[in-house]
Amino acid sequence: IAAWLRKTTAVLNGQPGHEALGVSYALFVAGDDTPINASLQQRSAPLPLGEVLAEFRASHTAMLAYLEAQPEDRLTARYNPDDPSDGRRVLDAIASNTYEHDEEHRGWIEERMKAEG
Protein backbone atom coordinates (compact mmCIF):
# COMPACT_ATOMS: atom_id res chain seq x y z
CA ILE A 1 0.00 0.00 0.00
CA ALA A 2 2.81 2.40 0.89
CA ALA A 3 4.52 1.74 -2.44
CA TRP A 4 1.42 2.63 -4.47
CA LEU A 5 0.89 5.74 -2.37
CA ARG A 6 4.53 6.70 -2.92
CA LYS A 7 4.07 6.08 -6.67
CA THR A 8 0.99 8.30 -6.82
CA THR A 9 2.77 11.14 -5.03
CA ALA A 10 5.78 10.74 -7.34
CA VAL A 11 3.62 10.89 -10.48
CA LEU A 12 1.80 13.95 -9.16
CA ASN A 13 5.20 15.57 -8.65
CA GLY A 14 6.25 14.75 -12.23
CA GLN A 15 8.43 11.73 -11.44
CA PRO A 16 8.22 8.31 -13.13
CA GLY A 17 5.84 5.91 -11.40
CA HIS A 18 7.93 2.83 -12.08
CA GLU A 19 10.92 4.38 -10.32
CA ALA A 20 8.85 5.18 -7.24
CA LEU A 21 7.66 1.57 -7.16
CA GLY A 22 11.16 0.25 -7.76
CA VAL A 23 10.15 -1.87 -10.75
CA SER A 24 11.25 -1.91 -14.37
CA TYR A 25 9.52 0.30 -16.89
CA ALA A 26 8.55 -2.80 -18.91
CA LEU A 27 6.81 -4.36 -15.91
CA PHE A 28 5.12 -1.06 -15.08
CA VAL A 29 3.62 -0.52 -18.54
CA ALA A 30 2.61 -4.15 -19.08
CA GLY A 31 -0.87 -3.28 -17.78
CA ASP A 32 -1.10 -5.89 -15.03
CA ASP A 33 -0.67 -4.90 -11.39
CA THR A 34 -0.44 -8.52 -10.21
CA PRO A 35 3.27 -9.01 -11.01
CA ILE A 36 4.06 -5.56 -9.65
CA ASN A 37 2.24 -6.38 -6.41
CA ALA A 38 4.06 -9.72 -6.21
CA SER A 39 7.38 -7.92 -6.50
CA LEU A 40 6.38 -5.38 -3.87
CA GLN A 41 5.11 -8.06 -1.50
CA GLN A 42 8.27 -10.13 -1.92
CA ARG A 43 10.34 -7.07 -1.07
CA SER A 44 8.32 -6.10 2.00
CA ALA A 45 7.34 -9.51 3.42
CA PRO A 46 10.55 -10.04 5.43
CA LEU A 47 10.42 -6.55 6.95
CA PRO A 48 9.33 -6.12 10.56
CA LEU A 49 5.89 -4.60 11.01
CA GLY A 50 7.38 -1.45 12.56
CA GLU A 51 9.41 -0.80 9.43
CA VAL A 52 6.41 -1.39 7.18
CA LEU A 53 4.31 1.00 9.26
CA ALA A 54 7.07 3.63 9.19
CA GLU A 55 7.16 3.45 5.38
CA PHE A 56 3.38 3.75 5.24
CA ARG A 57 3.37 6.74 7.57
CA ALA A 58 6.12 8.47 5.56
CA SER A 59 4.21 7.89 2.30
CA HIS A 60 1.00 9.13 3.90
CA THR A 61 2.73 12.25 5.23
CA ALA A 62 4.17 12.98 1.77
CA MET A 63 0.71 12.70 0.23
CA LEU A 64 -0.79 15.03 2.84
CA ALA A 65 1.97 17.57 2.18
CA TYR A 66 1.23 17.36 -1.55
CA LEU A 67 -2.52 17.86 -0.97
CA GLU A 68 -2.03 20.83 1.33
CA ALA A 69 0.17 22.58 -1.23
CA GLN A 70 -2.24 22.24 -4.18
CA PRO A 71 -4.84 24.71 -5.41
CA GLU A 72 -8.30 23.22 -5.90
CA ASP A 73 -8.08 23.32 -9.69
CA ARG A 74 -5.01 21.06 -9.60
CA LEU A 75 -6.93 18.45 -7.62
CA THR A 76 -9.73 18.35 -10.20
CA ALA A 77 -7.35 18.27 -13.19
CA ARG A 78 -6.59 15.08 -15.11
CA TYR A 79 -4.23 12.79 -13.22
CA ASN A 80 -2.30 11.59 -16.25
CA PRO A 81 -2.89 13.97 -19.16
CA ASP A 82 -0.28 12.13 -21.28
CA ASP A 83 -2.40 8.96 -21.28
CA PRO A 84 -5.61 9.43 -23.29
CA SER A 85 -7.08 6.22 -21.84
CA ASP A 86 -6.73 7.52 -18.27
CA GLY A 87 -9.56 9.96 -17.65
CA ARG A 88 -9.20 10.04 -13.87
CA ARG A 89 -8.86 13.30 -12.00
CA VAL A 90 -6.08 13.84 -9.48
CA LEU A 91 -8.59 13.30 -6.66
CA ASP A 92 -9.70 10.00 -8.22
CA ALA A 93 -6.12 8.73 -8.35
CA ILE A 94 -5.50 9.81 -4.78
CA ALA A 95 -8.67 8.06 -3.57
CA SER A 96 -7.82 4.82 -5.35
CA ASN A 97 -4.33 4.80 -3.83
CA THR A 98 -5.27 5.91 -0.31
CA TYR A 99 -8.47 5.08 1.57
CA GLU A 100 -9.96 2.90 -1.20
CA HIS A 101 -6.74 0.89 -1.44
CA ASP A 102 -6.49 0.63 2.35
CA GLU A 103 -10.02 -0.77 2.53
CA GLU A 104 -9.31 -3.24 -0.28
CA HIS A 105 -6.47 -4.75 1.75
CA ARG A 106 -7.90 -4.30 5.26
CA GLY A 107 -8.30 -8.04 5.97
CA TRP A 108 -4.73 -8.82 4.97
CA ILE A 109 -3.41 -5.90 7.02
CA GLU A 110 -5.31 -6.99 10.11
CA GLU A 111 -4.05 -10.56 9.74
CA ARG A 112 -0.45 -9.43 9.49
CA MET A 113 -0.79 -7.14 12.49
CA LYS A 114 -2.31 -9.97 14.58
CA ALA A 115 0.46 -12.34 13.52
CA GLU A 116 3.13 -9.87 14.63
CA GLY A 117 1.15 -9.12 17.80
Image: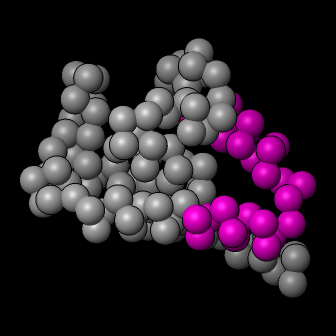
| Number of residue marks | 0
Q: How is the image coloured?
A: one colour
Q: Residue at x 26, y 23 (%)?
A: 82
Residue 117 is left or right of residue 77, and the answer is right
Query: Relative to 9, is 80 above or below?
Result: above
Q: Which residues are magenta?
A: 32-58
Q: Position of residue 51 (x, y in %)?
A: 78, 66
The quadrant in which the C terminus is found is bottom right
Classify 3 as above or below 19. Answer: below
Image coords of residue 31 (percent x, y): 50, 24
> Does the magenta stretch mainly form a helix, a strand or a loop?
helix
Residue 107 visible (yes or no):
yes
Comparing 95 with 57, the one in front is 57
Classify residue 96 by image quadrant.
Answer: bottom left
**Residue under the point 69% across and 69% down:** 54
For residue 85, what is the image quadrant? top left
**Residue farthest toward the bottom in the current orientation of the protein:** 117
